[in-house]
């Protein structure tokens, strides 16, 4: 075979970097959601509770022990 009949091989295309101004709002939103989840797992009982009763506590009870938060 001659070189003329071989297909040209191109270098793999590298993806363009995502600008920070597009990532920043999602990073802030994700951070706030993580803080909210941490609050519900770690502190939603007693004097700081947003919702009365033990419904949220019972819902996140196993996750609370898994993450090392005491609750008993």
Image: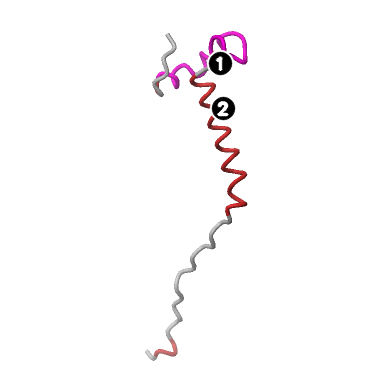
- Disc 2: which residue: 36
**Residue, disc 1:** 56
Q: What residue appears at the point 62 percent right and 52 percent down from the top-left corner?
A: 21
At horizontal 62% and vertical 9% (from top left) the residue drawn is 52
Question: Which callout, 2 or 1, points to the residue nearer the camera?
Answer: 2
Number of residues whose C-alpha sits closer than 10 Å to that of mark 1, classed few (under 14), some (14–19) or many (20 or more): some
Q: Is residue 9 above or below residue 50?
A: below
Which of the 4 image quadrants contains residue 65? top left
- Label 2 or label 1, whichever comes before in sequence order: 2
x and y, in percent, of residue 7 in the image: 45, 81
Neighbourhood count class around disc 2 (C-alpha, 10 Å): few under 14, some 14–19, many 20 upward: few
Q: CA distance from mark 2 to mark 1?
A: 13 Å
Q: How many marks?
A: 2
Q: Circle 1 sits in a helix, a strand or a loop, which is it?
A: helix
Callout 2: helix, strand or loop? helix
Q: Is residue 56 magenta?
A: yes
Q: Is residue 5 above or below residue 40?
A: below
Query: Predominant secondary structure in magenta?
Result: helix
Mark linked to residue 71: none
User: Which quadrant holds the N terminus?
Assistant: bottom left
Q: Is residue 35 magenta-colored? A: no
Task: Determine whether 34 is above or below 51 in the image.
Answer: below
* The one of 10 and 19 positioned closer to us in this rendering: 19
Residue at position x 56%, y 16% in the image = 56
What's the magenta region? Answer: 45-65
The image quadrant where one finds the C terminus is top left
The coloring applied to the image is: secondary structure
From the viewer's side, name the closer residue of 2 and 9.
9
């Amino acid at each position: 075979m001659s070189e003329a009949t071989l297909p040209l091989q191109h270098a793999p295309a590298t993806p363009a970097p995502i600008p920070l101004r597009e990532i920043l709002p999602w990073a802030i939103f994700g951070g706030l959601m993580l803080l909210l989840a941490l609050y519900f797992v770690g502190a939603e009982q007693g004097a700081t509770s947003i919702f009365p009763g033990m419904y949220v506590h019972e819902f996140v009870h196993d996750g609370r022990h898994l993450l090392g938060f005491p609750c008993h």
